[in-house]
Image: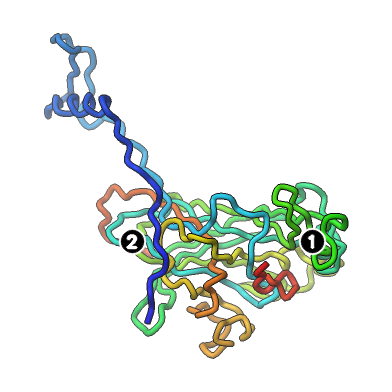
Amino acid sequence: MRTRGNTAGNGGSRRLLGRAAVLIAAASAAFSPGAGTALAQPGGDQVIHSVPSGDLPQPAPRTEVIYDSIPAELPPHVASLGYQATGTSEFGDEVGFGPGGHRKLKSLEVVLSSWACEAGRWNTNDCFSSPDVTFDHPVTINVYEVDNSGPTPVPGTLLASQTDIATIPYRPSANPVKCTGVDAGRWYDAATGTCNDGIAHPVVFDFGGTLLLPDEVIWTVAFDTSGYGAEPIGTGTACFATPQGCPYDALNVGAQTFPGSPYAGIDIETDAAFLDPVAAASYCDAGAGGTGVLRWDAPCWADNGPLARITATEARDGGQGASQGASQGGKGAGEVDKK
């Protein structure tokens, strides 16, 4: 039986405008149909302004967080799923927003985890990266309708897909002074006093507030690596021949369940996720339900929920026609890093 996960409000609150609200209401009551609307000075009959009917400016649509599993204070490192290490092409979660909302998708934020080194490797204790050095890689966010017609949910219609060129930091250099013993090869974060393998990096995708969302969706992150993805990049690249390898092969997607999350919205099944790896061992069921296809997987994701923050604007059309139209790393940039 499928059970609904944690729920949380969006933390928003209605502001009371006090006397200003009364004045606005009073002015609104004085409006009458016609070519224009006249406003008079208090206690007098002198017209001081005339506004043609229908020309009043409309307020900008309000943006609100409708799902959020990313903590306000993101730690320097999060548990993550390595795409190259696990043969994964796509990974995400089924989430809900509660009934009755007329929401248009504004943005979707995910957390990437970079284990890439400018020179050396994260698992050979010789990682080196210059400060603030980055690499670029195309990353895709997909949003699917949920097909609940069978015993387990499956991705339905692709409602939205957006590919951005993400600018991603290399992880900082190994710190042989602060990070020794079992922490050897890791980088040191002075703010938290921790030694870390990867560096967490949030990326926001702007969808523009045009897609009317249903009450539940499946969202995923997809990108290509040397060996996997919709169009594997291959091993003939210049970076593949270097000692450090290609940085995108050491790129993971954040998957960690933080206390109290989600902070807004609903994680439909807290111990499930959606993923598409070719390696049977990457699934909770060891591939019994099939490999190399994006599908529901449970029940081993309770501590490793995919991280996302989704915002939406309120639809002005009344919501008619809902959503039409469409590491623990293998130690090889990590499979699922649970440190």
Left or right of 323 on screen, residue 125: right
Q: Which residue is mark 1?
A: 186
The amino acid sitting under disc 2 is Gly
Is 268 rendered above or below residue 172?
Answer: below
Is 312 rendered above or below residue 34?
Answer: below
Left or right of 70 on screen, residue 59: left
Q: Which residue is mark 2?
A: 98
Query: Residue 137's x, y, as percent?
Result: 67, 59
User: Hey, which quadrant is residue 188 in on the image?
Assistant: bottom right
Say which of 35 and 258 sits in front. Answer: 258
Left or right of 5 on screen, residue 195: right
Say which of 84 and 19 sits in front. Answer: 19
Query: Residue 12's x, y, as percent?
Result: 38, 46
- Tell me whether the residue at label 2 lies in contact with that at label 1, contact meaning CB atoms closer than 8 angstroms: no
Query: Can residue 281 be seen at all in this image of the molecule?
Result: yes
Considering the numbered disc 2 on the image, is that residue within a helix, a strand or a loop? Answer: loop
Residue ID at (58%, 67%)? 222
The amino acid sitting under disc 1 is Arg
* Tag nearer the camera, 2 or 1: 1
Considering the numbered disc 1 on the image, is that residue within a helix, a strand or a loop? Answer: loop
